[in-house]
Amino acid sequence: GLVRFLPFGRPGSVQPYVGGGIAAVNFRYTETGEFVDPTDLTIFCAGTPGCASPRYLATGTAVGPVILGGLRLPVNGDIYAFTIEGRYQMVEGKTGGAVAGFLGDKIDLGGGTINFGVLIRF
């Protein structure tokens, strides 16, 4: 869920806003192919034909904070408006690490986005 605060502007004028919230990201991450063992540099495979080892798979839902900022640009009073919004989420998923066959035990699911939208009040 997200919350937006409109600290400046009034209906009918350009309205900058900021906000934040929590993101729940459902993920599925797999690795297949040939890999190099970093300790002895031997090559091993996962999930390829003829391989004895299965592919590596991690699934789950990760939760983390989201920050955002944007502008509402009204058209025709306050009935219609265009929006532009930037978001950044900080979310990390857990892979299971070496027990599941992965080198790391976390996967970065965060990053930034820019969203464009249209608002219609009725």
Image (cartoon, rainbow, N blue to C red):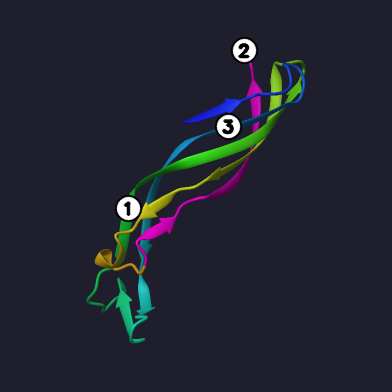
- Could you tell me residue 117's position as x and y percent? 64, 32
- Could you tell me residue 119's position as x and y percent? 64, 24
Q: Tell me the crowding category of disc 2: few under 14, some 14 to 19, or many 20 or more residues within 10 angstroms, Cα based.
A: few
Q: Secondary structure at mark 2?
A: loop
Q: Nearer the viewer, mark 1 or mark 2?
A: 1
The amino acid type found where label 3 is placed reads Gly
- Could you tell me residue 87's position as x and y percent? 59, 41
Residue assigned mark 2 = 122
Q: CA distance from mark 1 to mark 2?
A: 41 Å
Q: CA distance from mark 3 to mark 2?
A: 24 Å
Q: Nearer the viewer, mark 3 or mark 2?
A: 3
Residue drawn at (44%, 43%) of the image: 64
First in residue order: circle 1 vs circle 2: 1
Residue drawn at (38%, 52%) of the image: 93
Residue assigned mark 3 = 19
- Could you tell me residue 81's position as x and y percent? 70, 24
Q: Which residues are magenta?
A: 104-122
Q: Secondary structure at mark 1?
A: strand
Q: Is residue 28 magenta?
A: no
- Left or right of residue 64, residue 17 in this image: right
Q: Is residue 117 magenta?
A: yes
The amino acid type found where label 2 is placed reads Phe
Residue assigned mark 1 = 59
Instruction: Give the residue at the far front of this rendering.
Output: 7
Q: Is residue 111 above or below residue 115?
A: below
- Left or right of residue 81, residue 56 in this image: left
> Which quadrant of the figure has residue 26?
top left
Q: Secondary structure at mark 3?
A: strand
